[in-house]
Image (cartoon, rainbow, N blue to C red):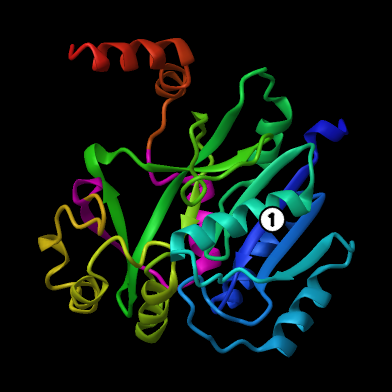
Amino acid sequence: MNSGDSINIGFCVAYDWEFLKNSLPLVYADADRICLSIDKDRISWSGQVYEFDNDAFYAFVRKIDHRGIIEIYEDDFHQPSLTAMQNEVRQRNLIAARLGKGGWHIQLDTDEYFVDFRGFTNFLKRFRSNRIVNICCPWYTMFKQTDNGWFFIREKANEPEYIPVATKHPHYDYGRRNGYFNIKTPFVLLHQSWARREEEIRQKISNWGHKDDFDVSSYFLRWKHLDKSNYRDYHNFHPIEPSNWSSLDLRPGNDLNQLLLELRSNPPFLISARSLRRHNSIWRSRLRSLLSKLGL
């Protein structure tokens, strides 16, 4: 393999590390290096101390890492002079520096599960361009889990939300975002996101990088009251950009592995090759930008 095509994966790890038990096995076989980055004092980006089972975490890593490719990187990622988002961005950039130059840098959260990671890495190894770009994946976001199944977010105009995942030039300005041109792909990331126990949601929204971006208490109550009797009433409910999440779907089931298998054979959204080619044309993007500046 060309060393320029090596697959280097970084995870931001914290109080929700146990989601790694789902996400890490999905990417391990096709990775060359994996960095699990965690605050050395077990303090969140917002400065909150969290419980963490060190023995269970290290035992899990020893068990899965039969190839010796995982590094646990512990550092101070909770500087009080920075906002939660600034601490997140700083940690992501430090992960990139730790993994070093060369190859593809992939950054994932512990609750993001690749439906077809091998297909994604094969795409990366075939990708040839002199442009500095992000490679993006569509999120299929779980909003809540109940006894009846999962509530999934339906994006506006049924267009999936894309998140930058991979680049050969890692640099992050806001979460995983930066000013690079974004290349969209059809490789779905199942995002557990809000589909957690009530106490976990409280912890998540009190400590993540977006905690200062919206009224977390009010939004938590809205999430808590969601059930099968009222989910059709939820419209335009993204916490930061409301129109991005247009409505909810209820999908039966409670087995995550079965869900991943179903999504491999039956993707959650139709992403046409023609649509991707149109979006991924940098010249078309520049034309749209110019017309927008001209008010046309």
Residue in the image at 35% along x and 10% along y: 287
Q: Looking at the image, is 212 positioned above or below residue 204?
A: above
Residue 214 drawn at (x, y percent): 25, 63
Is 253 in the magenta? yes
Left or right, 264 with reference to 211: right
Is 215 in the magenta? no
Q: Looking at the image, is 154 positioned above or below residue 201?
A: above
Residue in the image at 85% along x and 59% along y: 69
Residue 192 visible in the snapshot: no
Question: The N terminus lies in which quarter of the figure?
Answer: top right
Residue that carries the numbered disc 1 in the rendered image: 95
The kind of secondary structure element at disc 1 is helix
Q: Nearer the viewer, residue 222 or 96?
A: 96
Q: Looking at the image, is 264 positioned above or below residue 284?
A: below
> Which stretch appears magenta?
242-269
Left or right, 35 with reference to 230: right
Residue 279 drawn at (x, y percent): 41, 22
Task: Name the kind of residue labelled 1 in the image.
Answer: Ile
